[in-house]
Amino acid sequence: MKKVLSFSLAAAFWTAVALVFALPGLSDRLDSRVLLASLAHWWPWGALAPVIIAIDDRLPLTGQQKLVAHLPIGLACAVVYAYVSAVIAAVLGVAAWQDIVGITTLKAAWHEMFWSLLVYSLILGGWATYRHQLQMERMERSFAAARLNSLRTQLDPHFLFNALNTISAQVEREPRLARKMIEHLGDLLRLSLASHSKPTIPLQEEVAFLDHYLAIQKIRFGTNLRIEMNIAPEVQHALVPSMFLQPLVENAIRHGLSPRAGGGTIVLQARRQDDKLYVGVLDDGVGLPKNPTAQKEGLGLSVTRERISGLHPQGSSHFSIHPRPEGGTAVEISFPLRLETA
């Protein structure tokens, strides 16, 4: 199917070129032979272009050596073009078949040699520009992937240090609970390693990772930590950045609920909004500092913000942190909804 589409696009392109060059002749008189002659002139280049590109790709030379090598190839191609053009002209009925045999076609090749070499060079130049553009796009994607991976790896030691710090506080006071925390931490590390090489994972896998983290925090806070999850079924398979919920929830627990003696509630929301996925992490904690200069994002939030904007550039994502009218803090995120394919 892809080859058929490429062939159709190429045929349409060279036909359009032929039509453009035929327009001056058609303006004087509506003669179909003018258009057919132009088609016989340009369709051969459409047939020869893939051959020219294939030869260029296989030449084991670079720079000036490659340019020198193309000169005799271009001359030979001009002769081949002349014969192919003569055959197509005969098929279309704008030239005689006997013109193909003998010296007539070679004379035509010689008279049009400069023009043929010019078109040959334009095909090579267009292909070189296209190939360079592809290389630049691959480099940009590689750079973006490396940057996103670097941001992702910053979260691992940050998360591990905080988790171990939480567990160490329970080792002497509650050894049995500490062992349960370590079990959940083992599951967290296993899931983290499994998703480390994936820039995005289904939301349901991200929630499974978050469940183990919340299990550790529930052991620590007991009934003082309450969790509500409102995740719409239609977004269970939405692709999200791996390990992006945990820093948001950790931030809500550490800065929103921990300062309160009675703890509080964290609400995780995920739903579809038009063609975007909305994710909200809401808490009823102490709220944001009243002093704007004290509202500094930690590593987890800043890295998560950068990862989302990196995966969804050009303003297609939204990330905001703001106080809730009823008290507490809301982190709200939205980005294009992309579902996992089977």
Image (tube, rainbow, N blue to C red):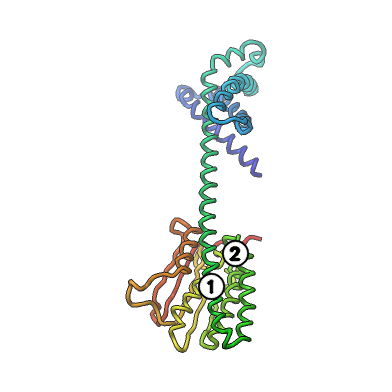
Let me know if residue 234 appears in the view. no
Across and down, in percent, residue 292 comes to 33, 72
Q: Which residue is mark 2?
A: 201
Tell me: residue 7, above or below residue 80.
Answer: below
Residue positioned most to the front:
172
Q: Which residue is mark 1?
A: 161
Mark carried by residue 341: none
The N terminus sits in image quarter: top right
Across and down, in percent, residue 85 comes to 61, 22
The disc, 1 or 2, on the residue closer to the chain's N-terminal end is 1
The amino acid on which the numbered mark 1 sits, given as a three-letter code, is Phe
The amino acid on which the numbered mark 2 sits, given as a three-letter code, is Ile
Across and down, in percent, residue 257 comes to 46, 82
| Helix, strand or loop under label 1 | helix
Across and down, in percent, residue 25 comes to 48, 22
- Crowd around label 2: few <14 · some 14–19 · many ≥20 (10 Å): some
Q: Residue at x 52, y 84 (%)?
A: 225
Q: Quadrant of residue 294?
A: bottom left
Residue positioned most to the top:
103
Q: CA distance from mark 1 to mark 2?
A: 24 Å
Q: As rendered, which of 150 and 31 lies closer to the eye?
A: 150
